[in-house]
Each structure stands twice: as structure tokens, then as C-alpha cells.
Amino acid sequence: MTAILEDITIESKDDDDLSTVTLNENNLIYDQLKSELTLKEIEEKENLKKLPIIYFPDKQLKSVAKVVKTFDEELISDIRNIFYSMRINDASSVAAPQFGINKRILIINVTKPLILINPILLTHSEETEISNEGCLCFPDYFTTVKRYKEITIAYQNEVGQKFSLKADNILSLCIQHELSYLDGKTFIDHFSSIKKMFIGKKITKIIKNRKK
């Protein structure tokens, strides 16, 4: 998601099987932010991959992402490559399927990097707000979407620990935007089939022009 940063409020919530949320620097990806190297130098030093963006109307975006059950080196590699690729593309949040990785992984980077694995929406406020949103999968396209003002989610980190997180403002909007991609949906799904077809043709033309 492409967005303007605003104030963020984060609170922890205790459940019997959920740890309180912590937003400490994540060593998996925060070192990329602290490094004085260029992104290209980081890519070469850490053997990272720039992942290709999956553009609408590619059918991959309609697939339901798989639950992460194995927390291993492959998962760590995926997370590092996703974060590197979102930085290359100047995105504030992404879902793994946007880069062709069919796993339930979100990375949000509005103040500090936040890795959300197998995120589940637990509760939301009755109050909503209108969000002006763009997306890597929809180059040069923006639209308004109604979102819940506050949400609470459950998720796991990169080693499988369980957490809960209450978010509002831009963090809430980013999480809601990216959650849709894990279920094969996008932020234009409320549009008519004709309008989605028109948007698809427009984006295909933009991509072709970029390749010239």
C-alpha cells in the first residue's frame, strides 16, 4: 500500500494463548534500514532477491494464500526478500502474494518493520473512515475505500510466537488493505466487473509502456 504516514497508536492485549505485542527492532529486516550501504550493495552482500511484482489482473492475485506451518530458513529468506523488494518499490506495506509468494505473510513498515504471519482479524470498531489508497499491483491507480478505524488482530512472528495487536490510523488501514490479498481479494473488488476490466486494460497498457 502507498500511503501518507500519520500518528500511530499501538496497544497490547493479553489473551491466554497470546503474548503482548512488542515492536522492538526486528533483526531479520531492520539491519537493512540501519545499513549505510545502498540497496544494490545490500542485495549483493546479503544475497537478496528483487522479487517481481504480480500485477492486476494476474490470476495469482485471486489465490487464497497458504497458512504458514513451518517456521524455517525458507520462511526467513522469504521475509528478507519481501522486505527488500518492498523497499526497492518504495511501499509502506505489502502482502507476500503481491510478489508471487503464496503464504500468509504481511510486512508493514510505517514506523518500524512489523512482520505479521498468519494474521487474523479479531475485532474492529463500528466507526469507519475513507482511505485514499494505491497499490504496487495497480501502478498509477488510486481509489477511495471505506475501512474500519480501529482493528485488533492475532498473528505470529517469524519463529511462530503468537501475538495480538490493536491498531488505528495508518497502521490499521495498511493492515486491512494487505489482509485482502491473503484471501485472493484486492482493494477494487467492490467495483463492477466492467470497471475492473477497464482498470485491468489500463494497467496492462501502463506495464507495456514501462517495458519500452
Image (tube, rainbow, N blue to C red):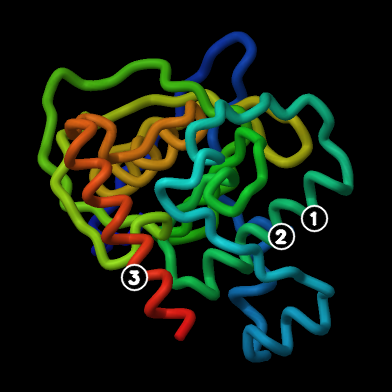
Give left or right: position of 40 versus 21: right
Q: Secondary structure at mark 3?
A: helix
- Give the residue pinned by disc 3: 206
206 is higher (above) or lower (below) than 71: below
Residue type at tag 2:
Arg
Q: Earlier in the sequence, mark 3 or mark 2?
A: 2
- At mark 2, the secondary structure is helix
Q: Position of residue 34 (x, y in %)?
A: 62, 78
- The residue depicted at 50 percent of the width and 22 percent of the height is 120
* Label 3 or label 1, whichever comes before in sequence order: 1
Q: Nearer the viewer, residue 110 or 101?
A: 101
Farthest-out residue, right:
73
Q: Is residue 149 visible?
A: no
**Quadrant location of the C terminus in the rendered image:** bottom left
Horizontally, residue 46 falls left or right of residue 62, namely: right
As shown in the figure, which amino acid type bears the numbered disc 3? Ile
Please state which of residues 201 and 182 is positioned toward the viewer in this rendering. 201
> For residue 33, which quarter of the picture?
bottom right
Mark 3 or mark 2, which is nearer to you?
Answer: 3
Q: Look at label 1 and name its amino acid.
A: Ser
Query: Looking at the image, which residue is at 51% across and 39% down?
Result: 59
| Residue 161 picture location, percent across and down | 71, 29
Depth order, front residue of 39/172: 39
Labels 3 & 2 near each other (Cβ < 8 A): no
Q: Position of residue 73 (x, y in %)?
A: 88, 48
Quadrant of the drawing holding the N terminus = bottom left
User: 145 above or below 208?
Assistant: above
Give the residue pinned by disc 1: 77
Q: CA distance from mark 1 to mark 2?
A: 5 Å
Q: CA distance from mark 3 to mark 2?
A: 28 Å
**Residues at marks 3 and 1, CA–CA distance in whole angstroms:** 31 Å
Mark 2 — residue? 80
